[in-house]
Image (cartoon, grey):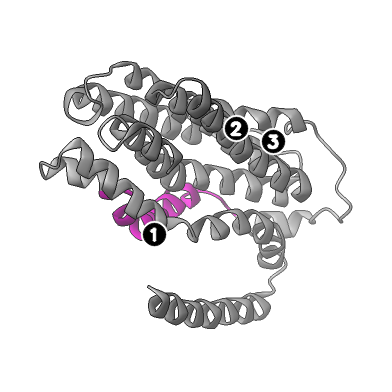
Amino acid sequence: MLGGRTLGAEDFSPVSVLLTIHFLTFIVIMLPIEQLVVRRLTIDRSRSGLPARAYWLAGSTMAVATLLAFLGADHYLNGDRRFVVFTALTIGVHFLFAVARGHLAGWRRFRAYGMSSGSASLVRLIVAAGVTLVRPSATGFALGLILGPLVVLAWRPFRRVEVDREELDEDAKNTLDDRGLLTGLVLAAASSQALLLVGPLAVGVLGGSAVEISIAFAAFTLGRAPLTFGYNLLARVLPPFTEMAARGERQELRAWARGMGWAASGLAVVAAGMG
C-alpha cells in the first residue's frame, strides 16, 4: 500500500506482480514444504533436511515463475526485466525462509518462529519506508521483499536443539507415512487459495492495464490479509496434532476439527456481515 501511494498505480505495477507471484508460490508451494518439515521433525527429530521431491518442486516452481515473468515482462513488468531476476530471487529466498521456519517449529522453537516471522515483515517495512523517504523506486520496494526473509538466519534455525518432550516410539513413527503428503498439501492450498491469489494476474490476462493490475492487487491483498493469521497458526498446531495422530488419538482430533469448523463458520458469518 505504501509503495502504491508513493509510486502511483502504473509505476507500482511491477511490484504488485512480483508480490502476487510471491504470495501465490509461497502459499501454494513453500508453505506446504514448511509443513512437511514440521511434520517430519515432529515424528523423528533426526529427520532434518528435505526429501528430493521438495527440492524438485521448489526448483521447478522457480523456473516456471521466472520464465513466465520473462515472457510477460513487457505487459506485466512495464518492460523492466530486472524483475525477472527479482522473481527468481524472491522464490529462492522464501524457499529458504520456509524450510528455516519449518525447522524452528519442528523443534518447537515457537517463540523464535514468531519472532523471525515478525522481524521479516518489520525489515520489509523499514526498507519500504527508507525507499519512500530517500528515493522512491519499484526496485527498492522489490529489494525489501527479498531481504526481509533473510533475517530468519539470525535465529540459527538449523541448529539442533533438545526438545522437552518424549520422543515418539518406533511403532508410533511407523504409523505415519509422508508419501503423497506434499502433493496433498499443495493441492489443498491451490484449491482453497489460488483463485484469491491469482486475481491481479488474471486482470492482466484479460487485458487490464498496469493501473488496473495495481488496483486489483490492492483489493485482493485486503481480502487475503486475515488469512495470514491462519498461515502462522498452522506451525503451532501441527506438531501436537501430528503426535496425537501418531498415538491414535482420533477421537480427540475429531473433536478439535469440529470445534475449529464451528469457529470458522461463526467467523465467516461475521466477516461476511462486515464485508
Residue 131 position in % (x across, y down)? 50, 25
- The answer to whether residue 49 is above or below residue 196 is above
Q: How many residues crowd mark 3 within 10 Å: few (<14), some (14–19), many (20+)?
A: some
Name which residue lies at 38% across and 40% down.
5
What type is the residue that disc 2 sits on?
A: Ile
Q: How many residues crowd mark 2 within 10 Å: few (<14), some (14–19), many (20+)?
A: some
Q: Quadrant of the N terminus?
A: top left
Which numbered disc, 2 or 1, marks the residue closer to the eye? 2
- Tell me where residue 171 sits by quadrant: bottom right
The disc label shown at residue 126, or none:
2
Question: Which residues are the magenta region?
Answer: 177-199
Residue 95 position in % (x across, y down)? 52, 32
Q: Which of the two discs, 2 and 1, labels the residue nearer the N terminus?
A: 2
- The answer to whether residue 246 is above or below residue 265 is above
Which numbered disc, 1 or 3, marks the residue closer to the eye? 1
- Tell me where residue 205 sits by quadrant: top left
Q: Which of the two discs, 1 and 3, labels the residue nearer the N terminus?
A: 3
What type is the residue that disc 3 sits on?
A: Ser
Residue 260 position in % (x across, y down)? 57, 76
Magenta segment's dominant SS is helix
Q: CA distance from mark 3 to mark 2?
A: 33 Å
What residue is disc 3 on?
A: 48
Q: CA distance from mark 2 to mark 1?
A: 24 Å
Q: Are marks 3 and 2 in contact (CB under 8 Å)?
A: no
What residue is disc 1 on?
A: 223
